[in-house]
Amino acid sequence: MMNDSIVKIFNGGKVIYQNKEINIEKLEWNKNPNKGVYLKHIVKGEDTAGKFSCHIVKIESGCEIGQHIHDSNWELHEVIDGEGKCFLEDKEIIYSIGTLSVIPQGIQHKVKAVNGDLYLFAKFIPALV
């Protein structure tokens, strides 16, 4: 599932708050309604007064997060492993390690994994969860 990439490093890491510490590897992968899509909620809105949230997103090879819109959230994708494509309205963005994509609120988008699994570190402002 994971190689010696930043995904493995992230998964073995910690989230440190002023009053608590969370081991990321102990957090569950949550199944998304889209087939082959999973999220690990790293920083939740309940811990940031709803200001922002951070998630590791896994999209299995050939699968996608279908067209959707976040009416109230800005979204930042940081590609941390794999390859894929993001369709931001009528623009196609090639996703590879190191790509960052800014998705404004209210903009229709989808993401597809190609040539293996795709991992994103996704951040939402305000918080998604």
Image (cartoon, rainbow, N blue to C red):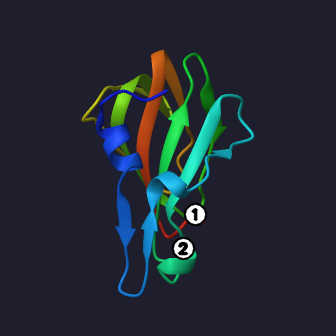
Whole-percent x and y of residue 31? 70, 43
Single out the residue that lies furthest toward the right: 33
Single out the residue that lies furthest toward the top: 115
Q: Secondary structure at mark 1?
A: loop
Real-space Cα separation, disc 2 to disc 1, in angstroms = 7 Å
Which residue is at 36% across, 30% downward?
81
Do the CB atoms of the residues marked 2 and 1 lie less than 8 Å apart? yes
Which residue is at 31% across, 44% downward?
9
Label disc, if present, on residue 128 of the rendered structure:
1
Nearest the eye: 58 or 34: 58
13 left or right of 106? Answer: left
What residue does disc 2 label? 45
- The disc labelled 1 sits on which kind of residue? Leu
Where 44 falls versus 95 (above or below)? below
Where 101 falls versus 49 (above or below)? above
Single out the residue that lies furthest toward the left: 98
